[in-house]
Image (cartoon, grey):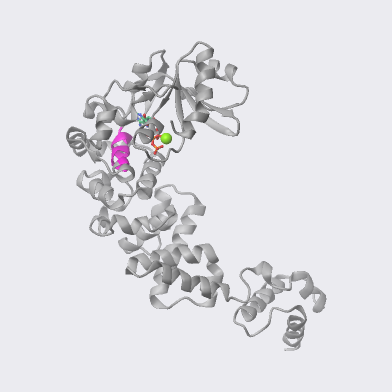
Amino acid sequence: MNSVFTKAIQILHMIERAGYEAYFVGGSVRDYLLKRDINDVDIASSATPEEIMQLFPKYVPVGLQHGTVMVLHENDSYEVTTFRTEEGYADFRRPSSVTFVRSLYEDLKRRDFTMNAIAMTREGEIIDPFHGEQSIHMKEIKTVGEASERFFEDALRMMRGVRFVSTLGFSLEQQTKEAIVEHASLLQHIAIERITIEFEKLLMGQHVQTAIQLLIDTKLVDFVPELAVYKKSLYTIHNDVYMVLPTKAERWALLFYTMGITDPAPILRKWKLSNKEIKKVKTFVQSVYELEKKDWDIYSLYMLGKDDAIAVERIRTVIHGESLDENIARVVTMYTSLPIATTSELEVNGKDVLKWIQRPGGPWIAELLHVIEREVLSGKLPNDKEKIREWVYTWDQK
Ligand code: ATP
Ligand code: MG
């Protein structure tokens, strides 16, 4: 068994010793059967959240209303969720109430896809009432139970189905796909935050182009913010191209570039990304556009900083189908030859300047430091305290 599970076996054992059932479930079992890297181990148990909290001294009650307690054990954390069924689905969203049950079968039955509805005991025995292993073998994404019904209960599942196409390279089983085509519009009832999580996982998958194509074919794309208008350009980027870009921000930036959008901020605000993320994507997109007008220069490199400059160069390179290693090496060389890499490397600071020039403090200090920074960057002035002092003195005379 995988080492991630081996460590978690103790948790299962402890729950079982207290007289309850506990199993590995969900994505970790699926990925284990697929021999893929396992992210996080999810545990399902017949014990209620209160019972779990009594068993483990260290925990975080992350989602008690859904039955989830995060158990902290030997520097690792595990989400333990009580077996539950979901009831009272209103407005095609998640259920209004959950009922804790003592049956594993009921818990597996409420899960979205057969491949995600497999449980595993701590001995490695597979419990698979909905034939998820067969689906995994056939690389198919198939709902547990009747597809239309399951999408009516929670329309996000349609989006999840397509994102698994991207992350796993599976296909939608025929009836599951037909049900998505039929009910795509239900996605409009889903909170954008939940759609964003799935879309970003889709973006990070290995089969982005395939999945985006599917978003378009199933018309789900009409119910996510803004993308529908750009359909045609969206599937022009090949799966392999996305794969070169290791971060979410880079992949978003590539997407906006293909859509011909220079300022992605208004759209990303609709997707409810954080201001920090929006700023990063915007910087990437705009830098790529600027590089089409003129090559890297000292200032653009310095302003971006090394990591972002490399990221931008990666995006630019894949767009033009150039050699990545060569281009990155060139940018790194240019960056390394900058006289200073950050403001903190400047030999002088505001205090020095104040000492040298007899003037009350004010915004002029920052302005002067900025001029010094540019002089040093351009190589006109050495980054040497004494030399800078002389320069400041002459500047003051002017
Ligand atoms: P990943 O490896 O990307 O995390 P995952 O399958 O673990 O994939 P999660 O979103 O972490 O996906 O959900 C964990 C499990 O919870 C799923 O495997 C599935 O069994 C169940 N699940 C999650 N969302 C839903 C949903 N909307 N409807 C039904 N079951 C769901
Ligand atoms: Mg998961």
Q: Residue at x 43, y 52 (%)?
A: 248
Is residue 159 rendered magenta in the image? yes
Residue 88 visible in this rendered orientation of the protein: no
**Percent position of residue 333, x then y:** 52, 74
Reply above or below: 117 against 101.
below
**How would you classify the magenta stretch by its main secondary structure?**
helix
**Percent position of residue 276, x then y:** 52, 53
Q: Quadrant of the C terminus?
A: bottom right
Q: Residue at x 31, y 29 (%)?
A: 112
**Percent position of residue 45, x then y:** 45, 19
Residue nearer the viewer, 120 or 95? 120
Bounds of the magenta span? 155-164
Residue 345 visible in this rendered orientation of the protein: yes
Is residue 182 rendered magenta in the image? no
Residue nearer the viewer, 251 or 134? 134
Total number of numbered labels? 0
Q: Residue at x 76, y 88 (%)?
A: 397
Task: Answer with the quarter of the image where residue 104 lies.
Answer: top left
- 318 displayed left or right of 151: right
**Percent position of residue 335, x then y:** 54, 72
Q: Quadrant of the N terminus?
A: top left
Residue nearer the viewer, 377 or 22? 22
Q: Residue at x 25, y 37 (%)?
A: 139
Q: Quadrant of ligand 2?
A: top left
Task: Answer with the quarter of the image where residue 264 lies.
Answer: bottom left
- 314 displayed left or right of 221: right
Residue nearer the viewer, 59 or 63? 59
- 71 displayed left or right of 145: right
